[in-house]
Image (spheres, helix red, strand yellow):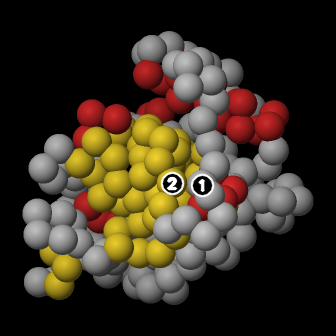
């Protein structure tokens, strides 16, 4: 794949944090998922480590137990994983209540089912190992600063085919995916971009 060729893209919805580097009382996971406290006392949950470096990798987790259709991402039918996927993480901003791109993993491995961590893989939360759905080399992962979280992700009420209750989403077609790819390439080059 050339550096300018758009890869297969998977979108994963998660709770809102600033850093995603582990539990942090000053930066808890917030959101409207049922597993999160919707009152004042938010807590850190499965995605809190999504951009934490562990042995040179990031291990990504999303809420719920939904499986990933790896064949939609270039994987063989029946395969348990697929490589070289662009995983785009998005979340609903608690202030604006609009979903935006929060970060991404490039050249990620995506699994059909959650993976139990092996020795040296994964993280612990409340002394229990966290399974993961995707992983990528840390150098290929980026979480955006608050001020850069501006690319809108439409829900099904905003636009037919937008994301719904399932945290796994495959996008809105080529035009939308091209805009996402351009946004990420521009951010990597530290250039501005026009937000759709």
| Among the 4 quarters of the image, the one containing residue 124 | bottom left
Residue 182, position as x, y percentages in the image: 63, 24
Residue found at x 62% / y 58%? 76
Residue 102, position as x, y percentages in the image: 47, 46
Q: How many numbered marks does the figure carry? A: 2
> Image check: 186 left or right of 165?
left
**According to the image, label 2 marks what residue?**
82
Q: Earlier in the sequence, mark 2 or mark 1?
A: 1
Picture layout, residue 18 above or below residue 62 = above
- Mark 2: few, some, or many residues within 10 Å (few <14, many ≥20)? many
| Among the 4 quarters of the image, the one containing residue 97 | bottom right
Residue found at x 62% / y 43%? 8
> Image check: 23 left or right of 100?
left
> Distance from label 2 to label 1 (Cα)?
5 Å
Residue 5, position as x, y percentages in the image: 62, 23
**According to the image, label 1 marks what residue?**
75
Labelled pair 2, 1 in contact (Cβ < 8 Å): yes
Q: Secondary structure at mark 1?
A: loop
| Among the 4 quarters of the image, the one containing residue 44 | bottom left
Residue 83, position as x, y percentages in the image: 47, 48
Name the residue nearer the viewer: 129 or 44: 129
Q: Quadrant of the C terminus?
A: top right
Residue found at x 48% / y 23%? 187
> Image check: 148 left or right of 42?
right
Residue found at x 63% / y 49%? 74
Residue 150 visible in the current orientation: yes
Picture layout, residue 71 above or below residue 187 = below
């Amino acid at each position: 794949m050339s550096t300018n060729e758009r890869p297969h893209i998977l979108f994963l919805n998660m709770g809102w944090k600033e850093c995603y580097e582990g539990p942090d009382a000053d930066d808890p996971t917030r959101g409207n998922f049922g597993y999160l406290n919707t009152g004042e006392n938010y807590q850190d949950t499965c995605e809190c480590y999504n951009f934490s470096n562990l042995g040179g990798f990031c291990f990504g987790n999303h809420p719920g137990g939904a499986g990933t259709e790896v064949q939609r991402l270039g994987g063989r039918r029946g395969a348990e994983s697929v490589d070289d996927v662009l995983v785009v993480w998005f979340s609903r901003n608690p202030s604006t209540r609009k979903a935006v791109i929060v970060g991404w993993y490039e050249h990620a491995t995506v699994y059909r089912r959650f993976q139990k961590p092996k020795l040296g893989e994964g993280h612990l939360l409340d002394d229990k190992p966290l399974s993961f759905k995707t992983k990528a080399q840390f150098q290929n992962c980026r979480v955006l600063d608050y001020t850069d979280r501006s690319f809108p992700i439409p829900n099904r009420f905003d636009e037919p085919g937008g994301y719904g209750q399932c945290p796994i989403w495959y996008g809105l077609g080529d035009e939308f995916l091209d805009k996402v790819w351009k946004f990420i390439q521009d951010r990597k080059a530290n250039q501005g971009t026009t937000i759709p």
